[in-house]
C-alpha cells in the first residue's frame, strides 16, 4: 500500500448530507484530512457556512455545494462540481436522510405521504446519488467506493418508527444488489449502520442519562460522529479493498444487548414523556 495507507490522496470524494454538524460533517473532516478533496453537499447553504466553513478555514480541501440530493437537478449539480475539482472522482458517502420527531407513530397511523417522504429522504437520495456516481465511474473506467449510512433501525425492529426503519433496511438491500452488479467494475458498495449517536439531530429526543446508556449499550455509552466517521473512512479506503456488500454495525454493542425497549416497546432513550405518549397513540 505504500505511504498512502488509505489510498485517498489526490482523489475526489462526494459526501451527501455533509452540512448537519454531525456524522456527515465529521466524515467530511476525516476524508479531507486523509488526502482527498471532498465535495460537501447539503440542501442548506446556511448549514454549509456554519459547519463546513470552519473546515475550509482550517485549510482542508473541501468544496461546499448547495444542492438537493433528492432531485435529479441536485444530483447533476453535484456531479458537475465534482468534475471541476482537481483529481479523479473515486468515492461517495451517502449521509443525507434522517427523520423528524413527527414521523414517530404506530404503524396504523402512517399515511402514504409519511411513508413516501421518509423513503424519498432516506432511500431515494442514497440510490439515485449512488446510481449517478457509479455510472460516472464506469464511464471513466475508474475504481470506486460507495458507503451509505443506514441505521440500527434498519437491521432490527423499529417500533413506532416503521417507515424510517424499513427505508433504512432498504438501503442495506439496495447496497447488496449494487455491490454484486458493480463488483466487476471494481466499485465497492457498503453500509455503516450507526447505533445511538450523539448528534445535533438526536438531541431533539434523546437526553443525557449515563445510567440508562450503561444499561442499554454493552460499551456503556453512546457513540460519537467521529467514531461513525472512522468506520466510513475504513470502508471508503483501500484498507477494505476486498470488502463489498457488507453492513458494518457501529453501535457499541447495543445490538448485542438490545434491551433499550421498555415495557411499552418504546425506546428508553426517549426523554420526553409527552412525546412518548404522542407516538404511542393508536387512534388518528
Image (tube, grey):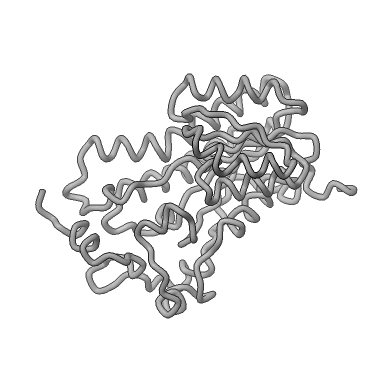
**Above-or-below relation of 166 to 48:** below
Q: Nearer the viewer, residue 262 or 204?
A: 204
- Residue 203 in the figure: left or right of residue 83: left
Q: Nearer the viewer, residue 282 or 102?
A: 102
Where is residue 155 drawn, in percent x and y?
43, 56
Q: Nearer the viewer, residue 137 or 125?
A: 125
* Image quadrant in which you'd find residue 110: top left
Residue at 51% in and 76% down = 220
- Residue 142 in the figure: left or right of residue 153: right
- Residue 79 in the figure: left or right of residue 7: left
* Image quadrant in which you'd find residue 146: top right
Where is residue 247 drawn, in percent x and y?
55, 52
Q: Nearer the viewer, residue 138 or 161?
A: 161
Residue at 57% in and 29% down = 65
Q: Residue furthest left?
A: 283
Residue at 47% in and 28% down = 68
For residue 148, say whether it is visible.
yes
Where is residue 128 drawn, in percent x and y?
49, 29
Amino acid at each position: 500500500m505504500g505511504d498512502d495507507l488509505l489510498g485517498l490522496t489526490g482523489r475526489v470524494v462526494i459526501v451527501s448530507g455533509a452540512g448537519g454538524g454531525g456524522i456527515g460533517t465529521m466524515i467530511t473532516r476525516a476524508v479531507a484530512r486523509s488526502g482527498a478533496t471532498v465535495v460537501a453537499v447539503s440542501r442548506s447553504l446556511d448549514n454549509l457556512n456554519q459547519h463546513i466553513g470552519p473546515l475550509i478555514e482550517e485549510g482542508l480541501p473541501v468544496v461546499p455545494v448547495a444542492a438537493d440530493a433528492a432531485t435529479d437537478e441536485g444530483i447533476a449539480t453535484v456531479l458537475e462540481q465534482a468534475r471541476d475539482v482537481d483529481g479523479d472522482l473515486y468515492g461517495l458517502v451517502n449521509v443525507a436522510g434522517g427523520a423528524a420527531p413527527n414521523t414517530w407513530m404506530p404503524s396504523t397511523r402512517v399515511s402514504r405521504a409519511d411513508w413516501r417522504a421518509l423513503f424519498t429522504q432516506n432511500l431515494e437520495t442514497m440510490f439515485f446519488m449512488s446510481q449517478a456516481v457509479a455510472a460516472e465511474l464506469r464511464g471513466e473506467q475508474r475504481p470506486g467506493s460507495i458507503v451509505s449510512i443506514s441505521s440500527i433501525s434498519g437491521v432490527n425492529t423499529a417500533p413506532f418508527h416503521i417507515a424510517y426503519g424499513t427505508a433504512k433496511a432498504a438501503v442495506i438491500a439496495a447496497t447488496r444488489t449494487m455491490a454484486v452488479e458493480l463488483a466487476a467494475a471494481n466499485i465497492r458498495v457498503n453500509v455503516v449502520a450507526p447505533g445511538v449517536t450523539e448528534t445535533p439531530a438526536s438531541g431533539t429526543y434523546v437526553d443525557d442519562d449515563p445510567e440508562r446508556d450503561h444499561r442499554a449499550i454493552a460499551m456503556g455509552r453512546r457513540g460519537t460522529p467521529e467514531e461513525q466517521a472512522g468506520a466510513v473512512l475504513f470502508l471508503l479506503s483501500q484498507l477494505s479493498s476486498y470488502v463489498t456488500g457488507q453492513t458494518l454495525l457501529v453501535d457499541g454493542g447495543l445490538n448485542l444487548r438490545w434491551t433499550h425497549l421498555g415495557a411499552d416497546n418504546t425506546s428508553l432513550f426517549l426523554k420526553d414523556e409527552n412525546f412518548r405518549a404522542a407516538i404511542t397513540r393508536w387512534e388518528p
